[in-house]
Amino acid sequence: MPKRIVDWLDLRLGIRDILEQNLTKYLLPRNINIWYTLGAVLLTLFALQFATGILLLIYYQPSPQEAFSSVQRIMNEIPYGWLLRNLHAVGSNLIVAVLLLHMLSALFMGSYKRPRELTWVSGFLLLNLSLGLCLTGYLLPWSQLSFWATTIATDAAGAIPLLGADLVGFLRGGTAVGEDTLGRFFALHVMGFPLLFGLLVAFHLFCVRRTGVSKPPFGPDYTPPKEHDRFHHEHHPGGIPFFPHYMAKEAGVISFFLALLVAITFFAPGLFIPPTANIPADPFVTPPGIKPEWYFLWAYQVLKIFPSELMGLAVQVVAMTLLALLPFIDRSPERRPARRPLFVALFICGIAIFVGLSIWGYFS
Amino acid sequence: MIHILGRTWGLLLFLLFLPTDVSAQQNQDETVCIQCHGGIPGAIGAPVRQWQGSIHQRHGVLCFHCHGGDPTDFGLAHSPERGFLGAPGDEDVPKFCGRCHVGVTEDYFESAHGQALGAGGPNCVTCHGSHAVQRATSELINPQDCTRCHEYGRAEEIKNAIAGTEAFISSLEGDVAALHRLGIDTSRLEGSIFSVRNEFRRLFHSVDVERVRNETDNFQQQLGVIAGQVEALQAELARRKVWGGAVVVLLILAGVLSLLLYKSYMEGKEG
């Protein structure tokens, strides 16, 4: 039966040729390492977020009067609702962690360099969009955590000179976090951001496929690729086929990450869902000790270190802009870490600063 | 490009968090009571400092909830027309607290403590304190405090009589809080425990040892029913973990098999 379907499609669309070109005859570097599988892990986790998100959407009600009770209903009455909600919440955190690992591996192996600047920039934008999705999703359960985190977060916009007050009003849809804020965040979370996200993912994958997978810059045989004046797809003659060889490796790593996701979901959901997430929003009671999610702790601490919020914001903008434009700043074709001591030193310092600020932010 | 990226990240940054104590402070500053009294040293400002960290503060009970007045207007904060009551006299304290704590006040008035009100007997704040009031536990019955007025013997008998039930209640409260942290809707269980606890505390505010002993079984039975519901939920969570553990094992196995498959493909290709 599957053969008949493929035959039918092949006759009309030449499907066998497409499959061959993109699977069995699509060759990857022989020394491709495990870090390259993180893209596939991310695609799987995003697909899971999409699926669980749609299922949650069936029962979720985006109004201050109904939001918390609808989430409680999902958690306590809908069959397997607790599983969907916990997978969605834990999955979002795991995605950010894998996104960071994916970005770090691209940095360490110099995969962002010419001709892959657009792949890097689209990936960087995807990271930011993912953080935007996390932030907008945070408000939706309309819990104490949601309400106060969003109140404090939107307050930060007030630090911008001249525009601050207007921006706060724009983000909230009013003077305080309320029904209009929930409406905006809901629309962005379930429609606006996912739409942009889908387009960007498609562009990112197109860049990867069109330019070709970069060869890992390790081993005695490695030499930096020649720079071309015209478009050039990086081929890997004698490499391993994407299917079945490399896909087996990807399937292995995806399985391990899914095992981690399921383990946290079943055994330690509280790691990413603090107690204040289970208390309905009360605009008159500020719960003590609200902290941002772990991936925002570094930024939270930067805002505290500097004497004014504006300075803290400016430092973050400069740091992130430098990161976004790195391929246009670091133009050397050399990708071997051993031959890029300055970059590796900065790379290690960057990770140490991120981790250090996050720990400081957590305990401050 | 730099401009666009800067603005994109900047917009995200607007949404980042500021220190929560700023917000908490703003919230408290909204009441003129705290704005004014909080900055005054000595006895007039002391209640604000004592109230901070109290059980009332944690539950959002503010100055005006007890003392009345308009918390939004400096001029009307002490206005009797806005319900300002000020501080009650010693004999008025039970009725003052009893506007919220209705049940225990009734039993208090019927007790030896209540009967002695105005004749050297204790009122609510004698044992519980006023602004720095904390969650009530049986530790409030102790030799140091009770012997301020009378011998400890009878108080100790009451403490021993309630100890088991109090421990049962505390244990259930801990179990229910743990369930709530996992997203379980525990509102009915919390309501049931709250109800039993209040009734039980009414009982021992009567300071009648025999009555406490006679009625303890009834409370233990009610708590037993709640404990059964808690255990059912805990069993359900345990079942979920078994299934979750099985899925984790299967996924790890799938991962190992996939990598073995990859290895065999690679060996085949090299061979």
Image (cartoon, rainbow, N blue to C red):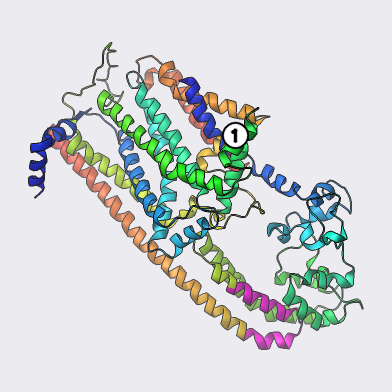
Viewed as shown, does residue A196 lie left or right of B91? left
Q: Residues within 10 Å of mark 1 (few under 14, many from 20)?
A: many
Query: Magenta part of the protein: which range?
Result: B192-217
Q: Is residue A122 magenta?
A: no
Quadrant of the frame with the N terminus of chain B: top left
Asked which quadrant contains residue A74, the reply is: bottom left
Residue A97 seen in render? no
Residue A172 in the image, given as x and y percentages of width and height: 58, 42
Find the residue positioned furthest to the right.
B119
Residue A346 in the image, given as x and y percentages of width and height: 48, 23
For the point 35% across and 40% down, the residue is A42
Q: Is residue A135 above or below residue A346?
A: below
Q: What is the total number of numbered labels drawn onto the structure image?
A: 1
Quadrant of the frame with the C terminus of chain B: top left
Q: Nearer the viewer, residue A221 or A160?
A: A160
Q: Is residue B205 magenta?
A: yes
Residue A77 seen in render? yes
Q: Is residue A197 above or below residue A341?
A: below
Asked which quadrant contains residue A31, the reply is: top left
For the point 87% across and 56% down, the residue is B78
Q: Secondary structure at mark 1?
A: helix
- Mark 1 falls within which chain? A
For the point 53% across and 38% down, the residue is A296
For the point 50% across and 27% down, the residue is A320
Q: Nearer the viewer, residue B262 or A184?
A: A184
Viewed as shown, does residue B119 lie left or right of A145? right
The secondary structure making up most of the magenta span is: helix
Residue A269 in the image, given as x and y percentages of width and height: 46, 54
What residue sits right under mark 1 in the picture?
Answer: A167
